[in-house]
Image (cartoon, helix red, strand yellow):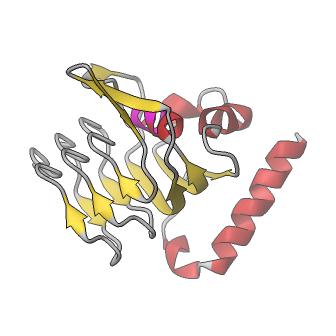
Amino acid sequence: MRNKVKWILAAVIALAMEPSRVLAQYDLYVEVLQPGTLEQLVYDISETAKDDVKSMQVLGLINGKDMMFLREMCGVKGIDTPTQGQLATLDLSRTTIVGGDDVYITVNGTKYTTHDNAFGPFFLYGCKNLENLILPDQIVSIDTMALANCQSLKNIEIPELVEKIGYGAFVACNS
């Protein structure tokens, strides 16, 4: 219970600091203080959140393990295995992507891990339910196929710091 109170307080403080992002209502707010812990934090709040949450804001530090979990929340595991996840709106504006060895997806035998401030190759590839995405404020690149085949994606906020958008980053984003 103490962690839930701490999480709610941290989320309220963070939202008070940036009122322009509060215009949207989210089903879930999670602050990740230690990369790789998003899944446990979500389960601590609600055991059904992974499959039931439709809108979410993530604050703090995320890595490959967290990205793999977000992909599952958005409706896909691996390259094309459907999940029960319903996440349609994802606000990552206040997150920092940190490099590490945790694999978030394997494509044709290649294992992808995170790199500091990069929205990596195949990050949210094939996330069938994702409609609205706010990218992390600090990213400098959107890599190859990062959002490809997100067929429901309608709105995306790309930060000004982005210097590079990789090949096919938005291919088959039909909406």
The image shows residue 23 at horizontal and vertical percentages of 50, 73
Against 2, is 101 above or below? above
Kindly report the secondary structure that dominates the magenta region of the rendered protein. helix
The image shows residue 106 at horizontal and vertical percentages of 31, 25
Residue at x-position 50% and y-position 32%: 102
Residue at x-position 55% and y-position 48%: 62
Residue at x-position 25% and y-position 52%: 143
Against 142, is 112 above or below? above
Q: Is residue 136 magenta?
A: no
Q: Is residue 143 left or right of residue 171?
A: right
The image shows residue 67 at horizontal and vertical percentages of 45, 39
Say how many tags the image has. 0
Q: Is residue 12 left or right of residue 79?
A: right
Quarter residue 140 falls in: bottom left
Q: The N terminus lies in which quarter of the figure?
A: top right
Most extreme residue toward the right is 2
Q: Is residue 71 magenta?
A: yes
Residue at x-position 33% and y-position 56%: 132
Q: Is residue 38 left or right of residue 86?
A: right
- Quick one: 138 or 49, which is closer to the camera? 138
Magenta-drawn segment: 68-72
The image shows residue 103 at horizontal and vertical percentages of 43, 30
Quarter residue 126 falls in: top left
- Quick one: 116 or 73, which is closer to the camera? 116
